[in-house]
Amino acid sequence: MTDIDDAIRQALSAEDARALEEFSGEQPLIRQAFATMAAGPNQVINVMGWMGGFGLFGAGVATGWQFYRAEEPHAMALGGAATVMAFIGIGLIKLWFFMEMHKNQIIREIKRLELQVARLAARGQV
C-alpha cells in the first residue's frame, strides 16, 4: 500500500470502510462473464453474442466432422476452411466479451474512487 491509500483508509469511518471493501477485490471470471448478460445497455447484444458463440462452436464441430469424414480433396478443403472460420469467429466473440468485462472492471474501479472522494468531501477533507 502507498501512503495515500493508508491516509484514505484512516479517514474513512467503519461504514465507509465496509462500503469500500464491497467494491474492492476482483470478481471471479465466471461471475464477470455472466454479469455482461445481467444488465446494461448491451444486454440483448451480449446474449446474442453468447448464443452466436455456442452456435459457432456447434458449426465448427459439425464442419470439423465433415472434414474428417471427407474423401475428396475439394470437400476436405471446404470442411477445413469452414471449421477454421467458425473457430476464428469464436475467438473474436471471446475477445469482445473480454473487452466488455475489462470495461466493467474499469467502471467498477471508477465508482469505487468516486465513493471515496464523495465520502471524503462530505467530511470536508478534500
Image (cartoon, helix red, strand yellow):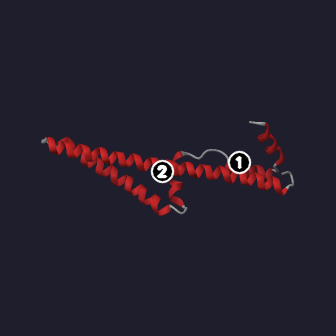
First in sequence: mark 2 vs mark 1: 1
Q: Is disc 2 placed on a helix, strand or loop?
A: helix
Q: Position of residue 64 (x, y in %)?
A: 25, 44
Q: Residues within 10 Å of mark 2 (few under 14, many from 20)?
A: some
Q: Is disc 1 placed on a helix, strand or loop?
A: helix
> Measured along the vertical axis of the image, is residue 81 above or below residue 40?
above
Tell me the distance, in whole angstroms, between the alpha carbons under discs 2 and 1: 26 Å
Which amino acid, mark 1? Glu
Q: In the drawing, what numbered circle is on residue 97?
A: 2
Q: Tell which of 11 and 19 is nearer to you.
A: 11
Q: Position of residue 59 (x, y in %)?
A: 29, 51
Q: Nearer the viewer, mark 2 or mark 1?
A: 2
Which amino acid, mark 2? Phe
Q: Is residue 87 left or right of residue 36?
A: left
Number of marks in picture: 2
Q: Mark 1 = which residue?
A: 21
The quarter of the image holding the N terminus is top right
